[in-house]
Image: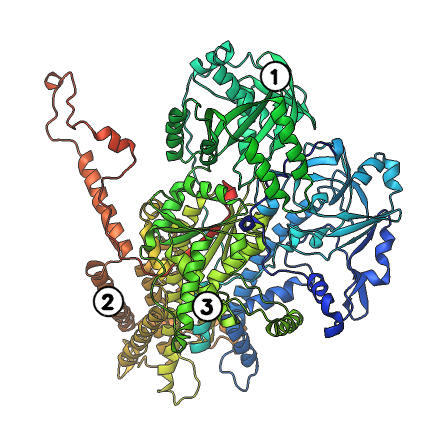
């Protein structure tokens, strides 16, 4: 390590109290045990569990009995996990039982399994067992095949990940990948790591090995003889903490998070890394934050379960996948004449710049301000450089620093190398080395960083860059260009760019010597070191001279602001859950237009005041303890936004302990109540107040237009999703692209993974996956809405056709003496839902769309019926019930009346049971297939073929099973010999079928006409608007009857609009009146996502 004191640690480790990464009450057993050890004699607590103990280069050490755990009966295995991961759900032995168990969680499947068991008993069954077995096996089989295909894909991805390199086991010394690093190729065993997959932060963090291992483990033979013993904490999900001890040669050395390389992080600027594995596989922190895979159900699925339990009917197995459409991408290329940077061999070949005047000023070196501007960018930073041939690869602690150093490099001020004491840059055509005297590092309180350098000529200068709010307070009164720079900053701020001010100050040797002594004393202070250093920094960072300002665009993916705007119009609430700092999270909110300038932003302190007021109001009204207060938290709910940190959020997410822990906490509470310090009146005193505080927070957040939770952990992301699901009963969708989003994705009702640069963990754990965030609007507003409409049509029709089919038996029982004789033949009952009426509704469930995709995206309000659940609920269920009752009455009583006292053409009465069954079945099949035709909004040739084909299949199968040939083969199974041919050759019975079908369908046609004319839905209005637009377009396309000749044409153009419209058009504002829609209901849908997907 360098003897020169550094000003502060990296930004990632120095945060204000509200920015510290929290871990909401997720302590492990060993931590609670250690707390209770203080009162061990009083509470007589048991001995603590054996901590993980690891010996280097001794794999057999872990096989000792004390390091094994019981799996089943007397079977034991090691308590340490291997490095292989597992995301699949089934294996060869567990697929069938687990898959059937999940499928029979659906009440419909369980109901028909019980019905099948009863039908096997001949004494109590009136129908053969195959009438239920065939449909049930078909449904279970299709679902099992779909689940098998999904799980095989997970097996392939797991195999690919686990076989990428050597499977790592604990207690092994490995190369190039480790958890506790012992020796690095870099000086002082120092390296940068990227933790984007862990906490979502893209900035790099410092990690360093122990000095003793770095000095004594230089060679491979030394590593082979390494036999240290590691004592550490139990595996847990805390990303911000690690405690351990290394015992080597009778000496103990402390291990903390700075010495650990966690799984999921990426090492930068390091060629070789030797280390010792502490945790592997499921014991690693990233896997502990992954959460468990949950069996998810839709709202309709849950509602169907209630309906099945209530009316004892079965439901369909819904398809999980949406119809995939090709998405066409359009690219446009704008050609410009860029500046030629061939004079700079280090310039990025992809760098495009058009300002030739600025480049000429830089190369001429005539303007000292420009020279100092780019020199500051190349010197004042913490970037590390790696040489790969003739190319320079910069690794920065933040994307902004990397962008600024790269920009200086492109303009000829190239950062070449750095050591602990020097920085070397290339200034246009000559190389200069500067001595680094002190580095005053950046943190979110200071909002600036500075560096003190000694120039080759002995001059000492301080370079500083930071936020304008802190830089302008420290500028010298004689500093120039303050107003000009402020105007530029205002322009940059309006464009939501991240800005920095650049300044410098010359320091005399005597002034620096005096300040250096104060700095040395503050850096070794054991108490309040951070405050002491900040005070010393303030003394030297004053009377600065302004150089200029920079602006950085954190470019989001294409279509992100437009997507968020459309989702907001669809009444979808959007919450941002990120591990970034507060400033970064707010900048992202403004960039994606989630936050606007006219919004009032409320922080944790404001929220605390509101929650305390609501808690006090509830305490002062004991009678209204269980009543929900109706008044809103904000007077203007549409112009508010919440920005809260994980530290504050930890006060809301009260985690429930295990039972053993809860008992211990009760003892602690008992000791606390006996003490003299009373509890805080502002804090909840019991579980009821904690739950009410959580509910108040969710209600307050839902009143806001935007919610941003920053510096949150993967565990907290999942807890926020659970909080919304618990208190709002809303459908939640989580979207993310990193391993730190896996738990959140699994917890939400719908999990979406984005395949990006942070790995495939989110994709593997998601329900849906795509490449860019903007595809979310198509997933929800197009495919999601279509899927909901199709599902609702499917369910309504499903109930209708089965009520119409089943209740005929009920009416028939009044005329057969309740003898359990069925109204149809057995094979018709078996094939009714499988062949005769399944294909048309299946195609509706796959292809139907009320409006096309363009209109769905153009009118986001079309999404509201799905949020309101207006297309399928108990009202729609009972409508389908009464519709089915009406159809069954017509199908039974019209043929029954037609068969009374009638005579056929042959002089015989056709009123036998079999003929009646044929007529009733034929009327039913034609009616239900034409009914689905009336419900179809999007017709294709396939739909038409399915309707006609289903009716044709019915008549073909009926004539076959009623033939004499098949009766000879199986006389006891096929008993309706000749019934179809005898009945359907009577014209009178054909008229009966036509009359029955007409009476069943005529009321439906009339009601649909009335609804579309008098009570049109949002979809009906959009279709009418589309028809009017099409007619208007066709009218414009029609050529005039009289064409104007060439002689009468003018040679110039007349402009008919007035001046002043250019600004209006360029502003992007719409002057077109928006179509009226129904007012939004309080029902919401919430999306939670990680903004690092940009």
Quadrant of the image occupied by residue 32: bottom right
**Relative to 573, is 92 on the left or the right?**
right
Judge from the rendering whether residue 197 lies leftward or rightward of residue 1072; answer left or right.
right
Q: Pointers 3 and 1 in contact (CB under 8 A)?
A: no
Furthest residue in direction bottom, as rendered: 817
Q: Nearer the viewer, residue 466 or 1070?
A: 466
Per the rendering, the mark at residue 620 is none
Residue 692 numbered mark, or none: 3
Q: Earlier along the polypeptide chain: callout 1 or callout 2?
A: 1
Q: Secondary structure at mark 3?
A: helix
Residue sitting at x 69%, y 26% = 421
Work out whether residue 428 or residue 322 is closer to the camera in this orientation and state it: 428
Given this view, does label 3 or label 2 mark the residue nearer the observer? 3
Q: Earlier in the sequence, mark 3 or mark 2?
A: 3
Q: Residue at x 47, y 54 (%)?
A: 733
Between circles 1 and 2, the one closer to the viewer is 1
Residue 188 x %, y %:
75, 33
Q: Position of residue 10 (x, y in %)?
A: 62, 39
Residue under label 1, please give it. 426
Q: Is residue 928 left or right of residue 251?
A: left
Residue 193: give x, y in percent of width and height: 66, 39
Observer-nearest of 396 and 469: 469
Q: Earlier in the sequence, mark 3 or mark 1?
A: 1
Task: Give the alpha-carbon distance from disc 1 to disc 2, as whole Å.
Answer: 87 Å
Residue 845 seen:
no
Location of mark 2 (residue): 1002
**10 Å crowding of disc 1: few (<14), some (14-19), many (20+):** some
Q: CA distance from mark 3 to mark 1?
A: 62 Å
């Amino acid at each position: 390590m360098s003897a020169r004191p550094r000003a502060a640690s990296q930004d990632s480790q120095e945060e204000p109290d509200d920015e510290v990464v929290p871990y909401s009450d997720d302590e492990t057993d060993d931590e609670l045990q250690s707390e209770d050890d203080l009162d061990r004699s009083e509470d007589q607590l048991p001995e603590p569990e054996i901590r993980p103990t690891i010996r280097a280069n001794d794999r057999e050490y872990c096989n000792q009995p004390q390091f094994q755990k019981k799996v089943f009966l007397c079977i034991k295995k090691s308590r340490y996990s291997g490095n292989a991961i597992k995301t699949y759900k089934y294996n060869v032995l567990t697929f069938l039982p687990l898959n059937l168990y999940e499928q029979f969680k659906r009440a419909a499947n369980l109901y028909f399994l019980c019905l099948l068991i009863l039908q096997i008993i001949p004494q109590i069954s009136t129908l053969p067992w195959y009438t239920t077995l065939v449909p049930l096996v078909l449904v279970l089989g299709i679902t099992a095949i779909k689940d098998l295909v999904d799980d095989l894909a997970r097996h392939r991805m797991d195999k690919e990940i686990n076989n990428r390199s050597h499977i790592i086991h604990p207690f092994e010394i490995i190369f190039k990948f480790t958890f506790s690093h012992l020796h690095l190729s870099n000086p002082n065993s120092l390296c940068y790591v990227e933790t984007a997959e862990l906490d979502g932060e893209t900035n790099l963090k410092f990690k360093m090995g122990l000095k003793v291992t770095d000095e004594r483990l230089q060679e491979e033979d030394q590593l082979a003889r390494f036999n240290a013993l590691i004592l550490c904490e139990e595996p847990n999900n805390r990303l911000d903490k690690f405690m351990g001890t290394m015992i080597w040669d009778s000496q103990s050395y402390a291990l903390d998070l700075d010495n650990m390389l966690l799984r999921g992080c990426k090492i930068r600027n390091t060629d070789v890394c030797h280390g010792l594995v502490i945790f592997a596989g499921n014991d690693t922190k990233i896997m502990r934050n992954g959460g468990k895979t949950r069996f998810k159900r839709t709202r309709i699925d849950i509602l169907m379960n209630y309906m099945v339990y209530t009316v004892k009917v079965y439901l369909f197995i819904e398809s999980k996948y949406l119809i995939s459409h090709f998405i066409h991408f359009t690219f446009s290329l704008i050609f410009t004449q860029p500046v030629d940077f061939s004079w700079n061999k280090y310039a990025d070949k992809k760098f495009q710049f058009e300002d030739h005047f600025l480049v000429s000023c830089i190369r001429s070196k005539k303007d000292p301000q420009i020279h100092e501007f780019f020199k500051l960018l190349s010197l004042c930073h913490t970037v590390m450089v790696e040489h790969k041939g003739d190319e320079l690869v910069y690794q920065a602690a933040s994307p902004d620093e990397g962008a600024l150093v790269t920009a200086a490099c492109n303009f000829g001020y190239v950062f070449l190398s750095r050591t602990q004491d020097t920085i070397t840059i290339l200034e246009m055509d000559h190389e200069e080395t500067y001595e680094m005297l002190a580095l005053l590092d950046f943190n979110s309180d200071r909002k600036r960083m500075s560096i003190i350098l000694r120039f080759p000529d002995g001059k000492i200068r301080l370079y500083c860059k930071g936020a304008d709010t802190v830089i302008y307070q420290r500028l010298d009164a004689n500093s120039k260009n303050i107003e000009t720079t402020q105007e530029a900053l205002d322009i940059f701020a309006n464009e939501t760019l991240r800005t920095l001010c650049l300044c410098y100050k010359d320091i005399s040797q005597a002034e620096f010597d005096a300040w250096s002594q104060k700095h040395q004393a503050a850096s070794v202070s054991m108490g309040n070191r951070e405050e002491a250093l900040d005070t010393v920094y303030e003394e030297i960072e004053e009377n600065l001279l302004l150089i200029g300002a920079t602006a950085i665009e954190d470019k989001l993916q294409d279509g992100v602001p437009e997507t968020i705007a459309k989702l907001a119009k669809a009444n979808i609430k959007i919450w941002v859950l990120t591990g970034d700092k507060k400033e970064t999270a707010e900048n992202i909110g403004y960039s994606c237009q989630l936050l606007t300038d006219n919004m009032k932003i409320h922080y944790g302190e404001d929220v605390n005041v509101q929650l305390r007021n609501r808690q006090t109001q509830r305490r002062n009204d004991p009678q209204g303890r269980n009543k929900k207060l109706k008044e809103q938290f904000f007077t203007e709910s549409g112009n508010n936004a919440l920005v809260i940190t994980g530290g504050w959020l930890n006060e809301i997410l009260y985690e429930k302990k295990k039972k053993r822990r809860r008992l211990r906490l009760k003892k602690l509470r008992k000791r606390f109540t006996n003490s003299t310090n009373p509890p805080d009146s502002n804090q909840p005193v019991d579980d009821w107040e904690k739950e009410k505080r959580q509910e108040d927070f969710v209600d307050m957040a839902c009143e806001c237009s935007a919610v941003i939770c920053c510096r949150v952990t993967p565990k907290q992301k999942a807890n926020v999703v659970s909080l919304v699901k618990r208190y709002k009963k809303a459908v939640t969708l989580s979207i993310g692209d990193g391993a730190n989003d896996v738990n959140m994705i699994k917890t939400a009702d719908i999990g979406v993974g984005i395949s990006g640069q942070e790995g495939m963990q989110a994709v593997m754990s998601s329900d849906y996956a795509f490449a860019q965030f903007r595809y979310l609007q198509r997933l929800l507003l197009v495919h999601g809405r279509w899927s909901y409409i199709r599902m609702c049509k499917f369910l309504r029709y499903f109930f209708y056709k089965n009520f119409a089919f089943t209740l005929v038996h009920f009416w028939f029982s009044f005329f057969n003496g309740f003898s359990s004789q069925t109204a149809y033949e057995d094979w018709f009952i078996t094939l009714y839902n499988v062949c005769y009426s399944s294909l048309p509704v299946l195609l509706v469930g796959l292809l139907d769309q009320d409006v096309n995709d363009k209109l769905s995206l153009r009118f986001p309000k079309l999404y509201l019926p799905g949020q309101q659940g207006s297309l399928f609920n108990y009202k729609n269920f009972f409508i389908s019930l009464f519709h089915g009752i009406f159809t069954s009455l017509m199908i039974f009583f019209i043929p029954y009346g037609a068969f009374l006292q009638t005579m056929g053409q042959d002089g015989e009465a056709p009123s036998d049971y079999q003929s009646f069954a044929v007529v009733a079945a034929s009327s039913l099949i034609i009616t239900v297939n034409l009914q689905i035709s009336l419900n179809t909004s999007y017709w294709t040739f396939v739909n038409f073929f399915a309707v006609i084909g289903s009716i044709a299949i019915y008549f073909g199968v009926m004539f076959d099973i009623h033939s004499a040939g098949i009766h000879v083969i199986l006389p006891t199974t096929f008993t309706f010999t000749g019934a179809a041919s005898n009945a359907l050759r009577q014209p009178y019975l054909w008229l009966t079928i036509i009359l029955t079908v007409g009476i069943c369908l005529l009321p439906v046609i009339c009601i649909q006409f009335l609804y579309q004319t008098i009570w049109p839905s949002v979809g009906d209005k959009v279709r009418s608007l589309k028809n009017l637009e099409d007619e208007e377009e066709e009218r414009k396309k029609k050529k005039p009857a009289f064409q104007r000749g060439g002689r009468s044409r003018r040679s110039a153009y007349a402009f008919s609009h007035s001046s002043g419209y250019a600004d209006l058009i360029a502003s992007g504002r719409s002057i077109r009146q928006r179509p009226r829609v129904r007012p939004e209901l309080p029902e919401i849908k919430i999306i939670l996502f990680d903004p690092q997907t940009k």
